[in-house]
Image: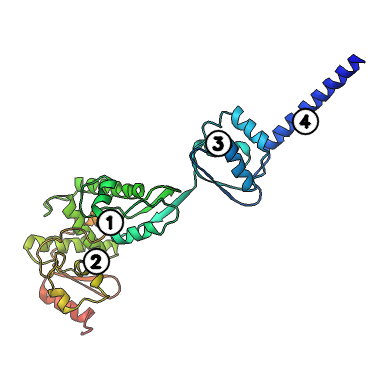
């Protein structure tokens, strides 16, 4: 009788063990993300039990026991990284844990277009729901110190680009990336600049690049416009560029520049103040920076809009006035 009980117990054990092993293999091998993408946010301090619960709450079809068994036996449990993860349909348990261990989190994007002002950047950052917002936009000096610079004026100091980031990245960290990239791009461009330029330092080149950026969106024209301004600087002529006037007007600019605006003295009114304005007026892109440091070697001193996004360039005031008549006053 005893042998029969032992034999029966052994059969049950073997059967149960075999069933468990088959169930485990099936649970690990089969897809557990079924119909649609799933997003899970693993936060600092989350235990394996908490992560398991989050997956179940998102309708990921895991067996919680086998999920934990695999996490521990594969030594994944202690290597899981925080962040938001995007789980695509068809993933199984090993693939999900591999994402968690590798830290392949979901990436969000934010774009700062060329020609934007620092105010534009702050507004774009403030409305982004995936960033951690820590900045006090009214204390610019403190903001710049957080980024890692003692520069007093932020305009033009951040490189226009699309930046990818993880959820909950701080706004300061994002701005520091844009600041560091502008610093790198400008330093490299300065190192490879043309000779005999009237700039004392890279910052002055950045100022001119920002003006070039605002004057034209046509890449081929940027060296031509930079050349005009370089020659004007060398001859001691006024730059007479509308974008600097507009920048100096600030909130008073309503879409048009009047004759009185051109006479009103501000540090940025290049119709009355010689030389470069004190700071950049926007974020220049790489093409504008390159143009400022590799200007056209022609002899033009003037340019006027043709009304189609391009400009007519002239070497003399007489030719310039004729171009103004043709393209602005519509006189032939």
What colouring style does the render use?
Answer: rainbow
Q: Is residue 114 shown to the viewer in this render?
A: yes
Q: Where is residue 10 in the image (x, y as percent from the top left)?
A: 83, 20
Seen from the viewer's position, the closer of residues 34 and 5 is: 5
As helix, strand or loop, the secondary structure at mark 4 comes to helix
Of the numbered discs 3 and 2, the one sitting upstream in the chain is 3
Find disc 2 in the rendering and name its residue: 215
Q: Which disc, if any, is residue 229?
A: none
4 or 3: tag closer to the N-terminus: 4
Q: Is residue 116 visible?
A: no
Between label 1 and label 4, give the one nearer the viewer.
4
**Foreground pick, 76 / 330:** 76
Look at 19% across and 61% down and name the residue there.
226
**Residue bearing mark 4:** 19
Q: Nearer the viewer, mark 4 or mark 2?
A: 4
Quick one: label 4 or label 2, which is nearer the N terminus?
Answer: 4
Query: Residue 240's quadrant in the figure?
Result: bottom left
**Secondary structure under badge 2?**
helix
Residue sitting at the far bottom: 331
**Which residue sits at x=24%, y=49%?**
186
Task: For the residues labelled 4 and 2, say whether their Cβ atoms are less than 8 Å apart.
Answer: no
240 vs 301, nearest the viewer = 240
| Residue under numbered circle 3 | 47
Does 234 appear above or below 183? Answer: below
Residue shown at 45% from the left, 51% from the top: 108
Looking at the rendered structure, the secondary structure element under dot 3 is: loop
Within-10-Å neighbours for mark 1: few <14, some 14–19, many 20+: some
Q: Which of marks 3 and 1 is nearer the N terminus?
A: 3
Q: Earlier in the sequence, mark 1 or mark 4?
A: 4
């Amino acid at each position: 009788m005893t042998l029969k009980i032992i034999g029966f117990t052994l059969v049950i054990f073997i059967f149960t063990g075999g069933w468990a092993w088959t169930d485990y293999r099936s649970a690990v091998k089969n897809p557990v993300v079924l119909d649609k993408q799933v997003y899970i946010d693993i936060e600092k301090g989350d235990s394996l039990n908490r992560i398991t619960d989050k997956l179940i709450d998102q309708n990921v079809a895991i067996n919680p026991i086998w999920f934990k068994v695999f996490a521990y036996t594969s030594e994944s449990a202690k290597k899981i990284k925080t962040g938001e993860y995007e789980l695509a349909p068809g993933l199984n348990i090993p693939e999900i844990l591999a994402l968690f261990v590798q830290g392949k989190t979901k990436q969000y994007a934010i774009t700062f277009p060329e020609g934007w002002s620092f105010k534009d950047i702050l507004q774009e950052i403030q409305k982004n729901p995936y960033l951690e917002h820590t900045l006090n936009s009214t204390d610019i000096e403190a903001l710049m110190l957080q980024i890692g610079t003692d520069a007093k004026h932020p305009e033009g100091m951040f490189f226009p680009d699309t930046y990818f980031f993880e959820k909950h990245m701080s706004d300061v960290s994002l701005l520091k990336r844009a600041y560091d990239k502008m610093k790198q791009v400008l330093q490299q461009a300065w190192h490879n600049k043309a000779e005999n330029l009237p700039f004392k330092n890279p910052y002055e080149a950045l100022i001119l690049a920002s003006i070039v950026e605002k004057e034209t969106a046509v890449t081929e024209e940027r060296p031509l416009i930079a050349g005009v301004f370089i020659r004007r600087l060398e001859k001691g002529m006024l730059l007479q560029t509308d974008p600097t006037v507009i920048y100096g007007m600030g909130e008073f600019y309503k879409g048009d520049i009047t004759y009185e605006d051109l006479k009103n003295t501000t540090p940025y009114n290049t119709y009355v103040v010689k030389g470069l304005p004190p700071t950049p007026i926007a974020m220049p892109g790489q093409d504008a920076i390159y143009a400022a440091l590799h200007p056209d070697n022609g002899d033009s001193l003037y340019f006027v809009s043709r009304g189609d996004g391009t400009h007519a360039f002239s070497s003399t005031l007489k030719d310039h006035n004729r171009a103004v008549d043709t393209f602005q006053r519509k006189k032939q």
